[in-house]
Image (tube, rainbow, N blue to C red):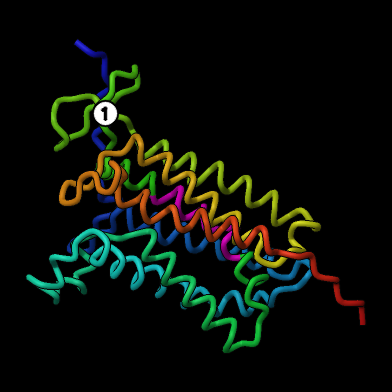
Amino acid sequence: MIPALLFPAFDPVAIAIGPVVIRWYALAYIAGIVIAWQVARRLVTRPPVAGTPEAMDDFVTWATLGIILGGRLGYVLFYRPDILVTAPWEVLYLWHGGMSFHGGALGVIVAIAWFAHRNRLPLLPFADRITSVVPIGLGLGRLANFINGELWGRPTDVPWGMIFPHAGPEPRHPSQLYQAAMEGVILLVVLQWIIRTPALRARPGFTSGAFLAGYGIARITGEFFRQPDPQLGFLFAGATMGQLLSLPMVLAGAWLMARSRRVAEAPAA
C-alpha cells in the first residue's frame, strides 16, 4: 500500500442563498481582479509614470472582458475545438466551466494595447504595471482548482500524494498547489521585486517580459506533474498542450527583456 492523503471534502460552493449560488472559483476571479487592481493603482504613478490611478480604474472593465472572453475562446480553440463543429453555441456557456489562461492572456494583451492607444498611454510601461500583479489572480485561481478537486496531478508515490474524487484510486500529485506556489507566490515575489526596483522599472517591457518568461517556465514545470487533459493527452514529443502554448511565452518574454532599454526620467516641472 502506498501512503496517501485523502482529498479534503471541500464544498465548491462558497455561498448559497436560495437560488443564488456563488462558487469559490468565481470568488477567486473576483478577489484576484480586485486585489490586483488596487496594487496596480499604486504602481502606475511610480516614475517613470505610466498613467493615473483613474486610468487603472477604467482599465479594470477592459481587463475583465479580456480575461473572460479570451479565456473562454482560448479554451474552446486550444482544448475543445470539437465544440465549434458539434455545438458552437456552447462557446457562450460560461457556466459550464472551461477557461484557458493562455486565451485569457491574449485577451488581456489585446485589451492593454487597445486601451493604451485610445488613452495615449505608454504601452510597455502601462503593461509592466499590470503584468506585475497578474500572479495574484493566478495563485488564487489555482487554489480554487484545488478546492474544486479538478486539474489534478499525475499518479505518484510521494508521501504527500493525494487521492482525488473522480480521479481513480491512485495517489496523485496535488499539482494545483505546486502551480499556485510557482505561478502565484514565487512569480509574484519576483515581479514585485522587479517593478519596485527603480533601475528595472525604468526599462519599459522588462517586467512584462519577466512575467511572460516566468509564467512560461512555471507552467512548463508544473505540467510535468499535472495530468494532461483527457481529450488531448500527450502531444508532440510527449508534451502537453499547456507546455506547447507556454514555450512561445518564454521566447517572447526573453526577447522583451533583452530589448528593453532604460528611459530617461522626465525633468520635474
SS class, disc 1? loop
Q: Nearer the viewer, residue 9 or 91?
A: 91
Q: Residue furthest left?
A: 86
Amino acid type at circle 1 is Arg
The number of numbered badges drawn on the structure is: 1
Residue at 75 percent of width and 57 percent of height: 200
Residue at 38 percent of width and 46 percent of height: 142
The residue indicated by pointer 1 is 172
Quarter-wise, where is residue 105 in the image? bottom left
Span colored in magenta = 130-141
**Is the residue 166 above or below the residue 61 in the image?**
above
Task: Tell me if residue 40 can be seen.
Answer: yes
Q: Is residue 176 left or right of residue 132?
A: left
**Is the residue 22 above or below the residue 84 in the image?**
above
Residue 13: image x %, image y %? 25, 50
Task: Tell me if residue 39 can be seen.
Answer: no
Residue at 53 percent of width and 61 percent of height: 252
Judged by its main secondary structure, the magenta piece is: helix
Quadrant where the image shows the N terminus? top left
